[in-house]
């Protein structure tokens, strides 16, 4: 039997930038999201920097984390085939290469340690199919 799904969802964004800048392990981020939102499952998307966002992100790194800028942007480029953004389907969410694989593995471990289950299977038991056409009363 499927369990009810809560409307609250935590989706912490784990990326080389957040790992480098926050200094917090992914398990801590996931536990915080779980406690704050009472989430039943979690997911991740690697940092995406589409079009106008990339220069803004670079400027913010210049202003607030100038010593980390080269490392952060380098890791993003490593996961995006040398670019800051890759629009290809599925690659834009997960990236590719060793850093992307490492982030995925860290997320899986943190996911288990935080005690978050897999996505619940949705149930259609609460829905009824109407047998005929409804009439609109005007």
Image (cartoon, rainbow, N blue to C red):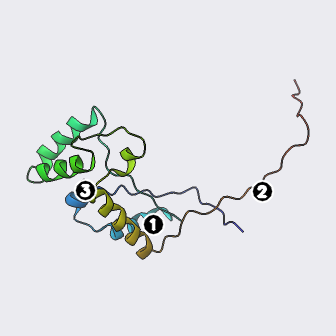
Work out how far the residue at label 3 is from the one at label 1, CA to CA, in angstroms. Answer: 21 Å
Instruction: Tell whether label 1 touches label 3 (CB within 8 Å).
Output: no
Work out how far the residue at label 1 is from the one at label 2, CA to CA, in angstroms. Answer: 27 Å
Q: Position of residue 85 (x, y in %)?
A: 29, 40
Q: Residues within 10 Å of mark 3 (few under 14, many from 20)?
A: many
Q: Which residue sits at x=38%, y=39%?
A: 88
Q: Residues within 10 Å of mark 2 (few under 14, many from 20)?
A: few
Q: Quadrant of residue 124?
A: bottom right
Q: Which residue sits at x=24%, y=41%?
A: 84
Label annotation for residue 16: 3
Q: Position of residue 125 (x, y in %)?
A: 78, 58
Instruction: Tell whether label 2 touches label 3 (CB within 8 Å).
Output: no
Q: Nearer the viewer, residue 36 or 97?
A: 97
Counting the numbered discs, the total is: 3
Label annotation for residue 126: 2
Q: Is residue 10 above or below residue 70?
A: below
Secondary structure of residue under mark 3: helix
Which marked residue is nearer to the observer: mark 1 or mark 2? 2
Q: Is residue 110 above or below residue 65?
A: below
Q: Which residue sits at x=16%, y=46%?
A: 61
Which marked residue is nearer to the observer: mark 3 or mark 1? 3
Q: Which residue is mark 1?
A: 34
56 sits to left or right of 41: left
Q: Which residue sits at x=89%, y=34%?
A: 133
Q: Earlier in the sequence, mark 3 or mark 2?
A: 3
Q: Earlier in the sequence, mark 3 or mark 1?
A: 3
Secondary structure of residue under mark 2: loop
47 sits to left or right of 130: left
Instruction: Tell whether label 2 touches label 1 (CB within 8 Å).
Output: no
Q: Residues within 10 Å of mark 1 (few under 14, many from 20)?
A: many
């Amino acid at each position: 039997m499927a369990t009810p799904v809560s409307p609250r969802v935590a989706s912490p964004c784990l990326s080389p930038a957040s790992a480098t800048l926050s200094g917090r392990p992914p398990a801590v981020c996931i536990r915080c999201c779980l406690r704050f939102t009472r989430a039943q499952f979690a997911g991740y998307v690697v940092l995406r920097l589409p079009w106008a966002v990339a220069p803004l992100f670079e400027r913010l790194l210049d202003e607030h984390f100038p010593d980390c800028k080269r490392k952060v942007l380098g890791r993003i480029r490593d996961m995006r085939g040398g670019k800051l953004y890759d629009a290809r389907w599925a690659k834009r969410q997960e990236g590719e290469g060793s850093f992307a694989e490492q982030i995925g593995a860290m997320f899986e471990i943190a996911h288990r340690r935080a005690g978050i289950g897999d996505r619940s299977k949705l149930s259609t038991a609460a829905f009824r199919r109407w047998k005929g056409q409804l009439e609109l009363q005007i």
